Image (tube, grey):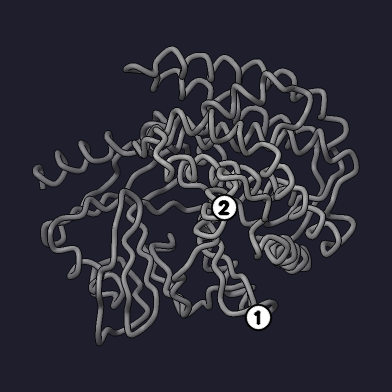
């Protein structure tokens, strides 16, 4: 038991949850094979973390089937194959279906509720819910029918790479993406269950959204180290400065529709399947704390998130062309500014022509800027914690947004 506690405390202390919350506390631990299951409290929420050992296949089998104490499984296995795992999840195939097991599970994850609802109302944009796995009552994993072989990011990066060579062609699926996001929002807007019933933004909501940016600025300062320390500190200062400017939009945002949205929409969460696009990973942003994943938000936030993802695609295209991540985050992003702006605006035009009118706010430009800053602040925290090497992309975006304020810079 003491060995379990020592390993659990070490694992929790090194987790991203501890880095963003600062108050992560172990409550219980359980050894299962050579893995450790940790029950914890962080940011005022209950959470489960798994420190995976070598026997990851056996661990997933026991989770899926419910053989582990305290776990409610949902499927017997015939053929399970692990296809990849990272810091936060394990991905496997089970009898031709996709299994995602969360290595960090928190109480405010509503993914299974969203997928069940979408399956009933708009199955063409859903990955196809099969069943879910739970620790106590906390979602631990999802099994879906669709496999997600080609994310839209592949297409956008390829078109951006061509644009670096002078092409002006936009991704062929760009307008379909706008329509598909509109269908997602129209469908979720009609939901009247307690977890998804739409409401209207108040001054308290706006204050909490601005406080996210302030909190992330503090987190970024705490993580600033190494050769990028001064740039990180400058980005944190820029976020604090823009958080002050964001207050000018408070009165225009009050009264806007807030609802259940995707919450972490980017081009690696959207997949093409025949003549439709479907969306995955409705669990919310991995390092969303201190915000909650079950908060209602305006649909324009998803649009800002996908716009930021298209920005990422231009930087990744630069990296594919031989640039470093730092150079690509400046040179490729600058060179493709016109192309990227055209792509984003065309996608938004298609979205606006398809979405319910009450879901697209008046004076949207200022509100878009508000959410571009908020999303970029999250991205920088994520990239640093995950050590992806891509932190220069949101870092330089934050500085560009500050220098361009109040003009939108895509």
Image location of residue 280, percent across then percent down: 53, 64
Q: CA distance from mark 1 to mark 2?
A: 24 Å
Front residue of 282/140: it is 282
Q: How many marks?
A: 2
Is 408 situated above or below 343? above
Residue 90 lies left or right of residue 192; in this view the side is left
Front residue of 259/100: it is 100
Residue with the mark numbered 2:
266
Image location of residue 310, percent across then percent down: 60, 47
Is 74 situated above or below 202? below
Q: Is residue 317 visible?
A: yes
Mark closest to the chain's N terminus, 1 or 2: 1
- Residues at discs 1 and 2 in contact (Cβ within 8 Å): no
Q: Quadrant of residue 82?
A: bottom left
Callout 1: helix, strand or loop?
A: helix
Quadrant location of the C terminus in the rendered image: top right
Residue 209 lies left or right of residue 24; in this view the side is right
Q: Residue furthest front?
A: 166
Q: Which residue shows up at 47% across the image and 16% down it?
A: 231
Residue with the mark numbered 1:
120
Question: What label does residue 107 carry, if any?
Answer: none
Q: Quadrant of residue 149?
A: bottom left
Callout 2: helix, strand or loop?
A: loop
């Amino acid at each position: 038991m003491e060995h379990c506690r020592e390993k659990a405390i070490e694992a929790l202390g090194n987790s991203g949850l501890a880095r963003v919350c600062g108050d992560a506390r172990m409550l219980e631990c359980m050894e299962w094979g050579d893995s450790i299951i940790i029950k914890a409290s962080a940011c005022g929420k209950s959470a489960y973390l798994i420190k995976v050992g070598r026997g990851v296949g056996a661990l997933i089998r026991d989770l899926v089937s419910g053989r582990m104490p305290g776990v409610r499984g949902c499927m017997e296995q015939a053929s399970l194959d692990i296809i990849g795992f990272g810091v936060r999840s394990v991905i496997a195939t089970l009898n031709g279906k996709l299994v995602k097991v969360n290595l960090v599970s928190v109480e405010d994850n509503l993914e299974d509720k969203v997928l069940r609802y979408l399956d009933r109302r708009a199955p063409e944009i859903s990955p196809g819910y099969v069943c879910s796995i739970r620790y106590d009552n906390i979602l631990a994993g999802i099994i879906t029918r669709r496999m997600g072989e080609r994310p839209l990011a592949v297409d956008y990066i390829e078109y951006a790479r061509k644009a670096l060579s002078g092409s002006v062609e936009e991704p062929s699926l760009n307008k379909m993406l706008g329509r598909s996001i509109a269908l997602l929002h129209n469908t979720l807007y009609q939901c009247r269950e307690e977890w998804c019933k739409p409401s209207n933004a108040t001054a308290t909501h706006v204050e909490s959204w601005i406080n996210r940016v302030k909190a992330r600025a503090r987190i970024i300062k705490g993580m600033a180290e190494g050769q990028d320390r001064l740039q990180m500190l400058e980005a944190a200062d820029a976020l604090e400065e823009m958080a002050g400017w964001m207050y000018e939009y408070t009165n225009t945002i009050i009264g806007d529709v807030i609802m259940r949205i995707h919450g972490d929409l980017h081009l690696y969460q959207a997949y093409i399947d025949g003549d439709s696009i479907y969306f995955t990973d409705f669990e919310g942003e991995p390092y969303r704390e201190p915000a909650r994943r079950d908060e209602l938000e305006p649909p324009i936030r998803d649009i800002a998130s996908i716009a930021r993802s298209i920005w990422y695609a231009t930087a990744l295209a630069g990296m594919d062309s031989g640039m470093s991540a730092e150079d690509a985050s400046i040179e490729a992003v600058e060179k493709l500014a016109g192309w990227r702006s055209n792509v984003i605006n065309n996608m938004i035009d298609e979205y606006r022509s398809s979405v319910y009118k009450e879901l697209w706010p008046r004076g949207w430009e200022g509100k878009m800027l508000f959410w571009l800053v908020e999303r970029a602040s999250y991205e920088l925290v994520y990239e640093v914690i995950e050590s992806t090497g891509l932190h220069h992309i949101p870092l330089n975006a934050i500085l560009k947004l500050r220098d361009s304020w109040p003009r939108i810079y895509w």
